[in-house]
Amino acid sequence: MAAADFRAKAHDALGNRELRANFRRAMDGLMSKRAMLFADRTEWTALRALGAAVRARSLLRLPELLEQLETRLRDNGIQVHWAETVDDGNAIFKDILSRHGARRVVKGKSMVSEEMGLNHALEAEGIEVIEADLGEYIIQLDHETPSHIIMPAIHKNKQQIARLFSQKIKDAEYTEDVDRLTDLARRVLRRKFAAADAGISGVNAAVAETGTLVLVENEGNGRMCTTVPRLHIAVMGLEKVVERLEEVPPILSLLTRSATGQVITTYVNMISGPRKPGEKDGPEEVHLVILDNGRSRIYADPELRNTLRCIRCGACMNHCPVYTRVGGHSYPGVYPGPIGKILTPQILGLETTGDLPHASSLCNACVEVCPVEIPIASLLVRLRSEGAGKTPHGGAPVKGAGSRRKSQEDWVWRAWALVFRMPLLNRLSNFALTRFGWALPSDSPLLREWMTVRSRPRFARRSLHELVRREGIPHE
């Protein structure tokens, strides 16, 4: 999606009352649940600092931890594959599935697979892919992408889901009973689990010390994807590695409480290898695909590297005044909300997603709730500067840096700086605006872009200095 599409989609979303009501209701519930579980500020501060330290330390040692992870995984019998681009990743999946003759796949929730467009890539090869997460299954039926990284179908209410199920699921009757809708989806998915040739999952954390893949979920579908089929393929971004197993509990505590307001998720899965001799369940083969897709470029910049701390909890979205009003489908790329505003431009480039860093009031709400202390607001300002071609000293230019630079805007700011450096020019400009500012046409080059999102400025008839002098108030 191009930048212009983001503006248009955001405008349309603002006029969709049903969508805004759905988001408002969902966000209010998520924010209140999170606030209850982090009511103790002392505990929140300490746990947050620990989580941030774990992620920062993992990133500091990322190259060696990835090598250690690969060694441990191979020792455990898990096959590791490296993908520099999404095309490389999709090719790896196609090759593995082809070698096993797999034509039916059940898939657990994975934002990295969404980033790869994996479903479309496999379906183009004639492979049936069924999303096993209830939210993902709902949006798959409606041919949509996730609107939230934790709750993909958060933009839909039960009436919309009821209509969708009655239209898309064979012999399904219309009902708005949530339990019956859930049971209907469960019956469909159970048949798919039993018939699947392979299961695909994401990874919440990969432990370098033990070669363990950690997955959290609430529905049990992830566990079915990773144990019932003979073949399990996991996929993750290269930043998901942590050094030691003892570092996983604080990350999970922060993740679940920040994401859904739970003390812990219903299921915590730790996978350290395929089925061993004598075991009754589990896949015969386990593969892990580790995706780069621009992450190495992000990692190379000491400031932008903080983006990779993200544990995908979605708390920043739940508290963002922009996201909660326009929804996830307004954003280009896969990741919406504040984390998407800093991650997507670095992956796809500022030339196509340069509007995203500007779609923020810099209110800092996302920074205050981020469980791993990502300085999102500072990174948004950095990306705005990058768009204008101003890379800080020592930093690595972002993809598409300078693509939003406008010579006219440069001259305007130079003139502004000159006016405020020279008292005489300052007084003359104030006099001109107070007397003749009303005559400035709305379609002038100076105001056209400004007024696309603002009201026409109204200039005072007299400057502050003139008013002070008229009242006889001493001033310098």
Image: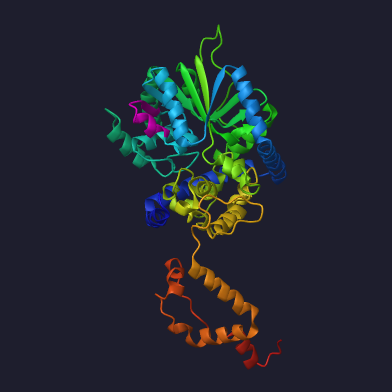
215 left or right of 179 in image: right
Q: Is residue 177 visible?
A: no
Q: Residue at x 50, y 23 (%)?
A: 223
Q: In the picture shown, does residue 145 fall above or below 280?
A: below
Residue 395, percent across and down?
63, 51
416 left or right of 60 in image: left
Residue 119, percent across and down?
39, 32
18 left or right of 291 in image: left
Along the line of sight, the residue nearer the viewer: 50 or 286? 286
> Hey, which quadrant is residue 144 in on the image?
top left
Residue 210, percent across and down?
65, 22
Whether the magenta-drawn stretch holds residue 121 is answered as yes
Q: How many marks?
A: 0
> Hey, which quadrant is residue 263 in on the image?
top right
Q: Residue at x 57, y 73 (%)?
A: 414
Along the line of sight, the residue nearer the viewer: 47 or 341? 341
Residue 326, percent across and down?
44, 53
Q: In the picture shown, does residue 336 fall above or below 361?
A: above
Q: In the rendered image, which quarter contains the C terminus?
A: bottom right
Q: Residue at x 42, y 53 (%)?
A: 6
- Magenta residues, as a range? 118-130
In the picture as drawn, the residue positioned furthest to the top comes out as 278
Along the line of sight, the residue nearer the viewer: 308 or 229? 308
Whether the magenta-drawn stretch holds residue 44 is answered as no
* Colour scheme employed for the rendering of this structure: rainbow
Q: Is residue 234 visible?
A: yes
